[in-house]
């Protein structure tokens, strides 16, 4: 009996020793799958290096999966990894949970009914009231919605933006405009990452404190509500950038996005604050925000777009990945004070 007990004890011990490595491996697998799912649920794009770390690939393994096409996708367990942005040697990937896609496609609610494009024009005082309201969750914002009809191609991904009126007080706006006029000689020509002189025509003011700090502070204050209005996943904010620009007669900015290069990849939201002399002495200068479509696994601009009017003392927010452009400005006087002025910038995710 003693021998049998010893044998049983030894067998139990050996079984536990054999199972521990297996349990450890399974725990590591579950952790990895949970991490991949979190990235998929966040809908954020990740770099090739981050993808390799997440899937425990090396770059050579990833290249072995590559087809003859420049852009490609591959399956990993029940996830699909798609190359969605390609800027030189810099690539960004999106991970999609295939099981969730299949479950969603079986839903009785059609995609056309679930999709919508909207533009909200909201008085900034309402945002201030919300920020100071302890029952913020009980306040419902009134928004203008435009439903996507069945005539819209399902491949078209509608762009969304929010425009807020009366962003600064009348006194702040007056002080900002005076500051800009006094600094006319400090404005410099703008440039672009493509180094194409015909791609962008405008001027910018490198330093404009304390108004840069004022705008950044106001943007940060309403970000939680904006993220909710844009119906995007909440994200960790790294910092907010700001620049001051002037568009005069014949100035423009051709179609581009704001996070298509390595140094701008963490830009999540773009904002544009408009201000000008009253009465307005220019026309044009609208912001065209393009809807998106997927071509060869790329997000590219669709033919359809939404137009944002440069309303004095208003600010517009949209996703930095959207393709957009500034339409040509017509300013007959060509006087600097009659320009289309903006403070534009980006909210970077941490």
Image (spheres, rainbow, N blue to C red):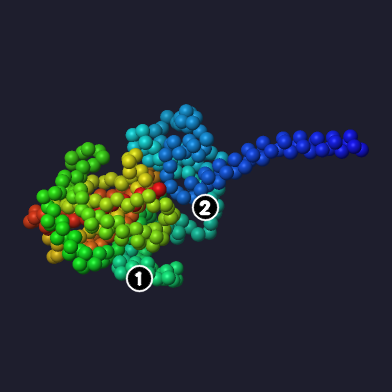
Residue 127 image-quadrant placement: bottom left
Residue at 39% over, 58% down: 227
Mark 1 neighbour density, 10 Å: few (under 14) some (14–19) many (20 or more): few
* Disc 1 and disc 2 in contact, CB within 8 angstroms: no
Mark 2 neighbour density, 10 Å: few (under 14) some (14–19) many (20 or more): few
Taking the image as drawn, is residue 158 in sight? yes
Mark 1 or mark 2, which has the lower sequence index?
A: 2
Query: Residues under labels 1 and 2: Cα distance?
Result: 40 Å
Residue at 21% over, 38% down: 196
Quadrant of the frame with the N terminus: top right
Residue at 16% over, 45% down: 189
Q: Left or right: 107 with respect to 266? A: right
Determine the secondary structure under disc 1.
helix
Q: Vertically, is 93 above or below 107?
A: above
Residue toward you, 111 or 255: 255
Question: Which numbered tag is attached to residue 105?
Answer: 2
Q: Which residue is mark 1?
A: 129
Q: Position of residue 140 (x, y in %)?
A: 41, 70
Q: Position of residue 46 (x, y in %)?
A: 43, 42
């Amino acid at each position: 009996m003693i021998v049998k007990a010893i044998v049983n004890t030894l067998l139990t011990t050996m079984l536990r020793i054999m199972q521990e490595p297996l349990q450890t491996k399974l725990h590591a697998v579950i952790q990895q799958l949970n991490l991949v799912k979190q990235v998929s649920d966040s809908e954020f794009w990740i770099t090739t290096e981050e993808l390799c770390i997440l899937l425990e690939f090396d770059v050579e393994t990833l290249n072995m999966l590559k087809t003859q096409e420049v852009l490609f996708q591959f399956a990993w367990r029940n996830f699909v990894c798609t190359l969605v942005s390609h800027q030189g040697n810099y690539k960004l990937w999106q991970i999609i949970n295939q099981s969730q896609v299949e479950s969603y496609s079986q839903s009785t609610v059609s995609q056309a009914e679930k999709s919508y494009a909207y533009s909200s024009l909201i008085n900034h005082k309402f945002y201030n009231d919300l920020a100071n309201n302890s029952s913020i969750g009980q306040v419902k914002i009134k928004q203008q919605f435009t439903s996507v009809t069945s005539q819209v191609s399902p491949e078209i991904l509608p762009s969304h933006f929010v425009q807020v009126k009366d962003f600064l007080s009348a006194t702040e706006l007056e002080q900002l405009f005076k500051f800009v006029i006094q600094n006319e000689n400090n404005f410099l020509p703008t440039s672009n990452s493509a180094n194409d002189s015909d791609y962008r025509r405008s001027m910018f003011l490198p330093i404009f404190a304390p108004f840069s700090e004022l705008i950044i502070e106001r943007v940060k204050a309403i970000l939680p509500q904006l993220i909710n209005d844009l119906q995007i996943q909440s994200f960790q904010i790294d910092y907010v950038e700001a620049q001051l620009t002037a568009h005069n007669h014949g100035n423009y900015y051709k179609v581009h996005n704001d996070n298509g290069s390595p140094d701008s990849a963490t830009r999540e939201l773009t904002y544009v604050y408009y201000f000008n002399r009253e009465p307005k002495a220019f026309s044009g200068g609208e912001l065209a925000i393009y809807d998106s479509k997927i071509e060869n696994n790329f997000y590219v601009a669709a033919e359809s777009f939404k137009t944002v009017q440069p309303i004095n003392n208003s600010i517009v927010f949209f996703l930095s990945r959207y393709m957009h452009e500034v339409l040509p400005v017509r300013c007959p006087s060509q006087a600097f004070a009659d320009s289309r002025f903006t403070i534009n910038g980006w909210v970077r995710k941490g």
